[in-house]
Image (tube, helix red, strand yellow):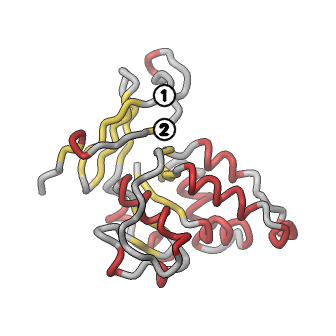
Amino acid sequence: MRLIVLDTNVLVSAGINPDGPPAKIVADLVLGGTVQTVTSPAVTAEYREVFRRAKFFRYGFPPLWLEFLIDESLRLSEPASWPHPCPDPKDAPFIALAHAAGAWLVTGNLKHSPEAIRNGVTVVSPADYLDSPGERDRYWIFFMPDNEVLAVGPFGIHVEQGNGGHPSAGGKKPRTEISNISPNRIVRLQD
């Protein structure tokens, strides 16, 4: 399964225009279960705050899918502060989270994440994300019987203790929350 961090502007666009690339990502890929979103407390708080702004009420915000998307996301603890200055400081938590998770950042504001500050993070527009299936298909999430979550991607393998039991082992659906990803638990993939 693929890992992505969705900038708030992508979710807002998905809620306003059901026919655009952001809506296709949310409806077809995320809610369809082929992509795993990654969130943190700061990202989740921003989603909820923005979607409750009065200016969006005319669009029926917050959309019903927002809480489902948050609940089903891979929830990480707050990553370390992003060391590179961002043109918009409010975008720093998103790129820091993508870096910590080995995920792609999908944003409608590419100019807020210039190449010089990315530090290896792949940052794409919603349209470009939809146009690059071969590249983005390299991420998978596995829920292991011993309550571990195994995330595999081009940056390595992350193994962390999750919450809840694995459904195949008779447990309830696991909460996909990982905290304290440490570099000594990462195995580098070889080409």
Q: Could you tell whether 153 is left or right of 5 in the image?
A: left
The alpha-carbon separation of the residues under discs 2 and 1 comes to 7 Å
Q: 83 or 58, which is in the foreground?
A: 83
Estimate the x, y position of residue 140 in percent, counting from the top left.
Answer: 36, 46
- Element assignment for label 1: loop
Q: Hey, which quadrant is residue 149 in on the image?
A: top left
Q: 127 or 96, which is in the foreground?
A: 96
In the figure, 181 relative to 27: above or below? above
Q: Hey, which quadrant is residue 169 in on the image?
A: top left
Furthest residue toward top: 170
In the figure, 16 relative to 78: above or below? below
Using the image, tell me which numbered label, if any, was put on residue 163: 1
Q: Could you tell whether 29 is left or right of 150 in the image?
A: right
In the figure, 26 relative to 132: above or below? above
Q: Could you tell whether 169 is left or right of 31 in the image?
A: left
Estimate the x, y position of residue 43 in percent, counting from the top left.
Answer: 57, 57
Using the image, tell me which numbered label, if any, was put on residue 177: 2
Give the residue at x 36% y 54%. 100
- Looking at numbered disc 1 in the image, what kind of residue is underneath it? Asn
Q: Residues within 10 Å of mark 1 (few under 14, many from 20)?
A: some
Give the residue at x 39% y 58%. 103
Q: Earlier in the sequence, mark 2 or mark 1?
A: 1
Estimate the x, y position of residue 160 in percent, counting from the top left.
Answer: 35, 35
Numbered marks: total = 2
The reply to whether discs 2 and 1 touch (Cβ–Cβ < 8 Å) is yes
- Element assignment for label 2: strand
Give the residue at x 55% y 70%. 90
- Looking at numbered disc 2 in the image, what kind of residue is underneath it? Glu
Q: Residues within 10 Å of mark 2 (few under 14, many from 20)?
A: many
